[in-house]
Image (cartoon, rainbow, N blue to C red):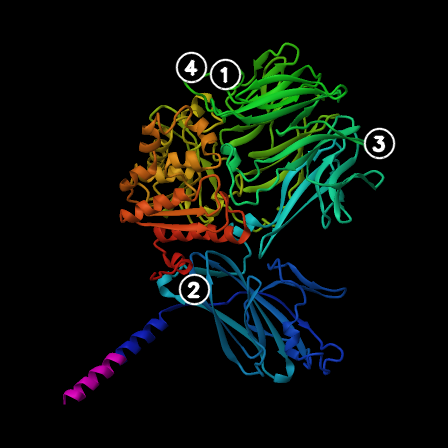
Amino acid sequence: MKKYLLFTLLIMLFSGIFSLANAQETEQQTVVVSHWLNAGPVEVKMPAFYEKNNMMGKPFSQADLLKFQQKPVADVKAGAEFLFSEDKKVIWENQDENSLTSDSPLALNWQAFYIQANRYVPVKIEVNTAQDFELFVNGELKLSNYNSDGKEESKGVSVKLEPGKYLVLIKSLFQKKDGKKWQVSAKVSYDKKFTDQAINLSTSDEQFLDITHILQGKMLTNTQISDDGKLVLLNFSETFPPDGKTINWFEVKQVSDNKTVFSSLHSDRSQAEWVPNSHKISYVAKDGVSEALMCYNLDTHQEKILMDKLEDFAGYQWDHFGKYLVFSVEEKYEKNTTGVFMVRGMEDRWPWYRTRTQLFMLKMSDFSVTPLTYGYLTNSLEDISPDDQRILISQSFPDYTKRPYTKQVMMEMNLNTMKVDTLWYASFGGDAVYSPDGKQLLVTGSPSMFNGAGNVLKKGVIPNDFDLQAYLFNLNDHKVTPLTKDFNPALLESYWNPFDKQIYFLVSDRSYQDIWKLNPETKQFQKLDTHVDVINQMSFAAKSAEMSYSGTSISTPATGWVYNLSSGKDSEVSNPEKSFFKNIEFGKTENWNFVDKQGWTIEGRVYYPPNYDPNKKYPLIVYYYGGTVPTTRDFGGRYPLNLFAAMGYMVYTLQPSGATGFGQKFSALHVNGWGKENAQDIIEGTKKFLKAHPNADADNVGCIGASYGGYMTLWLQTQTNIFKTAVDHAGISFIGSYWGQGYWGYSYSSVASANSFPWNNKKLYVDQSPLFNADKVNTPILLLHGTADTNVPTGESIQFYTALKILGKTADLVEIKGQNHHILDYKERILWQKTIFAWFAKYLKNQPEWWNAMYPPKDL
């Protein structure tokens, strides 16, 4: 009896288990595909001699017609052409039926739909048909049936979808001999635990921003205008999956009609420059087995060699009349092969430090080469005088006796006599170019340059030496005149235009990068009205009123423009990614500022999700740098805020105290700040932002920063509990170890921690280091770091991770093998980006599945 009862209980138990399992298996949300994009049917024929075997003994079957790719499938939307001939076009059309008809013995058809995955979700795609078919997801073959024999059956494939848009394509082959109706149906199912809105099906190709659109596409990188302003040279790059191979090339366009007159695509040409006063371009190209400096005449279409057999060629600059150029050649120190190496100074840790460059002149009259410089120090060309008789040369070398631990010598060389005169020998150096009359220099350098001539701060306040200023330097009496110390934007580039005699500055102006004009006589500034938010570079015609520039805007990739300095009007000459982004839907952006406790206006902006609903609550991500430069309104980059918004987050970014571009008083707060005012700005700003935006979910706020912003991320978690989670990339956890170990730790600290050292300011180095406050952290933290980081050593993350683990805190460390401070390799960049997304989804959306799929739990 007992045995019978036990047996009965076991049967009931197992029956219950199986019933539960079956119930769980049926807890699926299923979406039937009811709307299609259809192209076809298209009649196909067997090739000649199909009945004969090939060299592998295999005949050509009808299923091989299906396997053969007629053309890549792209631009799938209603009305788009797919296949066409002289008498027929096959276009993509909306279709609600699953049935197809064809009078041909053999025919192919293409059916497509889109899946919008709103979160990480594994799905099963099932196809029911009596025909042979192939199923592709985003161009990758996922499922096929080449042996249907006219029998209707269902086949399915499981696919793990990350947030984003997916094109599902079913290509089927109709064989009339089977006598079956040509019907193809499909459905998509997923576990109900992922909620009803995990996916949406549609026939629209509109989508939100994704990582593909950040990394791929034809990107404009630079523009150069010819001296007469009639032609513009455009530099491009494009990266291709799966390994991230990148090609670079340039094109030349006519400004008048935007017509391309030259392209270096599919050729190996680099370092392209305009030859002065001409329609000639020079560049480095392959000449047989070695490299050569070449020149191409766009008017005559003739190419000639200027200098062949280039070795260790580092760069070049033309004079003003095309009679000569100055080029630099690298000299490498004899390699140490003993394995024992004496470090001769902090810079000697840099693998490239013992490489030096020297200057040479190449004359166009006879193509002879003259050495201009020699010695154990690198000689850098700063500029060539307007009469081409003199050049500016600079040297830099370590000087550990005082800040910034380097000295610069600026010299002027007479090219006729080779005589060199020293213009200055100083600790704070800068860049210099000649005035149009050759009597003055336009110099850019720190506020401390020329004994603090550019410093507007009261005595005893150390300026932020990253906040670059401009000066006039008189070559006759060496008198220095500051130009910009009362000008708030920070300088990035400068140019003294010989055509209109005006000075032009590319500046960091709060969240923007603009071009400003300075009249050297009246000292009046004027901002140019341009078309982009963040200008990356500018180029000027020497003989006309044209200027070219390129840049990005908050939701627009790089475009190129030609600007007329007389009329103030510009025209677009390049928008290479316009078609690539035509289907991308961006969310709105808007500025949001507040006044902090010190009375400073802290500027910021907010990015909304593309499908933003003001009646819903959204998790919030707060992004900042917190160091000396602002987070600009540029597009893309390593932390593309539009991309975070596309993942369903509101994003708030702000410019805490210490950033350049707001004036010297504001930027000086960075010096010896290390988390004082700037961290409080972020905390105060986040609280005020949440109060002003009730649809931002105060219970699900995350933060992210890198480098100094990574330090800020770690420091913030020791000061507040307002963040539910934090992501730090390459952050500084101990200011002292970064100061001593980072390649640029001591030199960066010469500004950020001016006159402060571990032995005279322990309060800064210890008390303001996150590592010594790790016990105050209550926020789950993700630490990311490249294992080859020479700027902020990987140990900064390791030691903080160690502290958090010992303290029993929630933290994960992800190392990116072989990557330096920036994650540049294509595959690693994608995994790194997805790691951040998955972490935020886990903690801010209560969706741990993506993280667990990337980093499943392991018992080690």
Name the residue beneath numbered marker 1. Answer: 452
Spatial separation of the CA atoms under disc 4 and disc 1: 11 Å
Identify which residue is drawn at 57% across, 81% down: 148
Name the residue beneath numbered marker 3. Answer: 366
The answer to whether residue 653 shows anywhere in this view is no
Name the residue beneath numbered marker 4. Answer: 458
Name the amino acid type tagged 1: Gly
Name the amino acid type tagged 4: Lys
Identify which residue is drawn at 64% across, 20% down: 411
Q: Quick check: 516 above or below 153?
A: above
For the N terminus, the image quarter is bottom left
What segment is highlighted magenta in the picture?
A: 1-14
Label 1 vs label 2, nearer the camera: 1
Left or right of 728 on screen, residue 87: right
Label 4 vs label 1, nearer the camera: 1
Spatial separation of the CA atoms under disc 2 and disc 3: 70 Å
Identify which residue is drawn at 62% across, 75% down: 173
Q: Residue 315, how many percent across, how many down?
A: 68, 35
The answer to if 174 sits in the magenta stretch is no
Label 1 vs label 3, nearer the camera: 3
Label 4 vs label 3, nearer the camera: 3
Residue contact at pointers 4 and 1, CB within 8 angstroms: no
Name the residue beneath numbered marker 2. Answer: 122
**Nearer-N-terminus badge (1/3):** 3
Spatial separation of the CA atoms under disc 1 and disc 3: 47 Å
114 or 631: nearer the eye? 631
Q: Residue 37, how many percent across, how many down?
A: 58, 64
Spatial separation of the CA atoms under disc 4 and disc 2: 62 Å
Label 4 vs label 2, nearer the camera: 4
Q: Using the rendered view, name the quadrant where residue 709 is placed.
A: top left
